[in-house]
Amino acid sequence: MMAITAVTIARLRNLFAVVVLSTLYSFLMATVLVVLDAVDVALTEAAVGAGISTVLLLGTLYLTRSEEAVPVHRAWLPFGVALVVGGLLAFGTLGLPEFGRPDSDIHQHVAPRYLEQGKAETGVPNIVTAVLASYRGFDTLGETTVIFTAGVGIILLLRRSRSDESDRPTDRRDGS
Amino acid sequence: MRAQIVPRVVTKLFIPFVLMFALYVQFHGDYGPGGGFQAGVTLAAAIILYALIFGLPNARRVMPPWLVEAMIALGVLIFGAVGVAGMLRGEEFLDYSVLSADAVAGQHLGILLVEAGVCVTVAGVMLMIFYLFAGRGRRPS
């Protein structure tokens, strides 16, 4: 179903339908994540992917036209690159350990300690929260800083257009 | 959209539950799925929903842009302050065990504060992005 949605998104020219379909894609993705028992990620995907991105995309659509321009030529080279990279990635997954196998490398490193000691050391039953906020607190601080930086960047970029109009006369006087 | 009564009534009914769910995700993140990021996004989504139905000027009255800007910085500051508080008590940066007399209680408190910081920043940034995007089209150009 996700593949059908993705192909439809790629083929459609009406951007409004594309936005709605990408919302559908996000919800399907969230469902898959719930099936994989990653409820925290599913919650994020549903809220950000399906909720806020849709609103932002619709807001952008309001500023632009809602029909995608027909490309002048068919993009065979990017298609070939995508096929090759996708093929390589699919080939790479063959080397991965079987899904959910308990003795694969990723489950041998620090994960057992988190799972065994986490409850006793942090008193937090949700191991995801414990790892995110406590064991990997530094990473989460970095993540928050990234979000902060993104926000500041957006403010700087989009605010400018507003202040330009009031600033321009003074700028011109300074320049001449 | 503002003239239609059904979306307005449904939104009015919905928003308290969305806000409640955000708080639940925030404070129940220790026990169930969720945490600061998800709570922040849900919080922002509630305000964005309000802005969509009742118009941007009304939403700006509920959450003024200066407050949203302050939230963006405040969240990171809360996070950093928790880390520094651990340092001041003679441990490593972001070690919560010393925040309270009991190590486990300290961890709990630290995680709660840190998640609150994440929540505030995420909600602020999401709202700010929405405000700036939505505010552009309304300008006469």
Image (spheres, coloured by chain):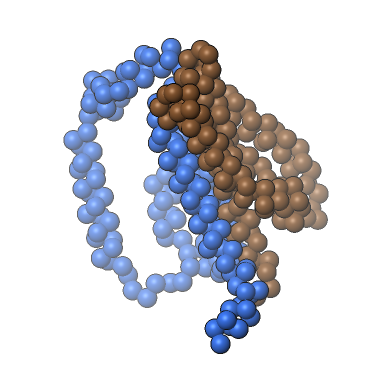
Chain colours: A blue, B brown
In the image, A72: left or right of A163? Answer: left
In the picture, which quadrant includes the C terminus of chain A?
bottom right
Residue farthest toward the bottom in the current orientation of the protein: A176
In the image, B3: left or right of A166? Answer: right
In the image, B139: left or right of A12? Answer: right
Residue pictured at 57% horizontal, 67% vertical: A160
* Image location of residue A155, percent across then percent down: 56, 58
Is residue A99 something one can see in this rendering? yes
Residue pictured at 20% horizontal, 43% vertical: A91
The residue closer to the viewer here, A153 or B83, is B83
* Image location of residue A29, percent across then percent down: 45, 40
Q: Residue A121 appears in which quarter of the rendering?
A: top left
The residue closer to the viewer here, A8 or B57, is B57
* Image location of residue B43, percent across then percent down: 63, 39
In the picture, which quadrant includes the N terminus of chain A?
top left
Residue pictured at 56% horizontal, 63% vertical: A158
Is residue B1 something one can see in this rendering? no
Position of A11 relative to A165 (above/below): above
* Image location of residue A110, percent across then percent down: 30, 23
Position of B112 relative to A80 (above/below): above
The residue closer to the viewer here, A91 or B26, is B26
Count of number-bearing discs: 0
Residue pictured at 28% horizontal, 63% vertical: A78
Position of B34 relative to A27 (above/below): above
